[in-house]
Image (tube, rainbow, N blue to C red):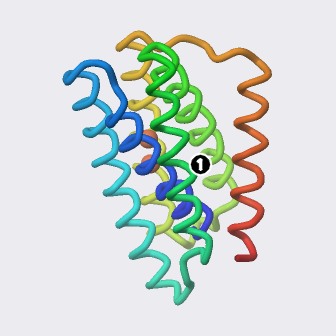
Amino acid sequence: MRVNHVGEVCAQALYEGQALSANTPALASSFRKAAAEEGDHLAWTRERLDELGARPSLLNPLWFAGAFAIGALAGKLGDRLSLSFMAETERQVEQHLAGHLEKLPTADARSRAIVQVMREDEIAHAQTALRLGGGEMPAPVRSLMRLAARVMTRSAHYL
Ligand SMILES: [Fe+2]
Ligand SMILES: [Fe+2]
């Protein structure tokens, strides 16, 4: 759940950054809407962490700052790239959450419910990004994003 919480810290920061550098007010507001939903996810995962008596990652401020900068940069590189980046991010997050659902004990109904709803929201976010003009990211970029996500999820296990 700490890993999921870090993911939501990043997602929210990315979309705030992307909203800031989006080229049209309409797109900026779409990113803000997604960021607000990631804000809900952030609150749910935080609440669940507290219930489980676990702490959030110590590196969260770092992840937030990094993700915000990457989001702002993605927006600067153009709306289409920014949307493609969002679509790929959400695809990877959705895959992570699907994997987490498989590992979560059936008895932990509350965690499962949270992850399930987040997964549905992330699928919708990917669809929105594609509908607004996002495309496919080049394979090397997708791999790099996967690598960054692995560093993030691994470190969140410990720190
Ligand atoms: Fe999310
Ligand atoms: Fe999302």
Answer above or below: position of 3 versus 102. below
For mark 1, give the secondary structure.
helix
Horizontal and vertical percent for residue 134? 47, 14
**Residue pushed farthest bottom?**
53
Query: Could you tell whether 130 is left or right of 141 in the image?
Result: left
The residue under the point 37% across, 66% down is 44
Query: Could you tell whether 79 is left or right of 92 in the image?
Result: left
When asked about the image quadrant of residue 17, the answer is top left
When asked about the image quadrant of residue 25, the answer is top left
The residue under the point 45% across, 67% down is 45
Query: Could you tell whether 6 is left or right of 116 in the image?
Result: right
Horizontal and vertical percent for residue 49? 49, 78
Residue under label 1: 97
Answer above or below: position of 121 versus 38. above
Closer to us: 91 or 69:
69
Answer above or below: position of 117 versus 125. below
Decide: few, some or many residues near mark 1? Use Cα within 10 Å; few <14, some 14-19, many ≥20.
many
The quarter of the image holding the N terminus is: bottom right
Closer to us: 86 or 43:
86
Closer to us: 148 or 21:
21
Image-quarter location of ligand 2: top left
Horizontal and vertical percent for residue 131? 37, 13
When asked about the image quadrant of residue 108, the answer is bottom right
Q: Looking at numbered disc 1 in the image, what kind of residue is underneath it?
A: Leu
